Amino acid sequence: MADRAKDVMKVDSINALADTGYYDGDDIAVCEENGITCFVTKPLSPGQAPEQLRADKFKYEKDLDIYLCPMKKILERSHYSTF
């Protein structure tokens, strides 16, 4: 997208801002080679998650088939998948 934006704006270089989900070292290297400076937060490794977001802090309620977060809020399902 940043490469396309650079073409549309007819510029030789551009800054691109993206969220953690877009962090990919290979993609960032290609962008840098093509005049695109990337600002993307490197994701935390699983062991570095903030204390309140660690998996062991979430509680499964078997009778209701739900998970509760540390704040005692129900985690809503975003989609269902059948394999």
Image (cartoon, helix red, strand yellow):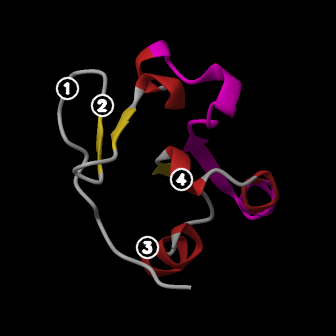
Mark 4, secondary structure of its residue:
helix
Amino acid bearing label 3: Met
Image depth: mark 4 or mark 2 in front: 2
Look at the numbered discs 3 and 4 and tell me whether their residues touch, using CB distance below 8 Å.
no
User: Which residue is nearer to you in this view: 55 or 30?
Assistant: 55
- Label 4, label 2: how many angstroms apart (C-alpha)? 22 Å
Three-letter code, disc 1: Lys
**Residue at which label 1 appears:** 72
Q: Is residue 77 left or right of residue 11?
A: left
The spot of residue 60 in percent (x, y) is: 37, 39
Residue at image mark 3: 9
Mark carried by residue 69: 2
Q: CA distance from mark 4 to mark 1?
A: 26 Å
Q: CA distance from mark 1 to mark 2?
A: 5 Å
Which amino acid, by three-letter code, is at mark 2?
Cys
Q: Position of residue 25 (x, y in %)?
A: 78, 51
Q: Are marks 1 and 2 in contact (CB under 8 Å)?
A: yes
Residue 70 lies within the magenta run: no
Mark in front: 3 vs 4: 4
Q: CA distance from mark 1 to mark 3?
A: 48 Å
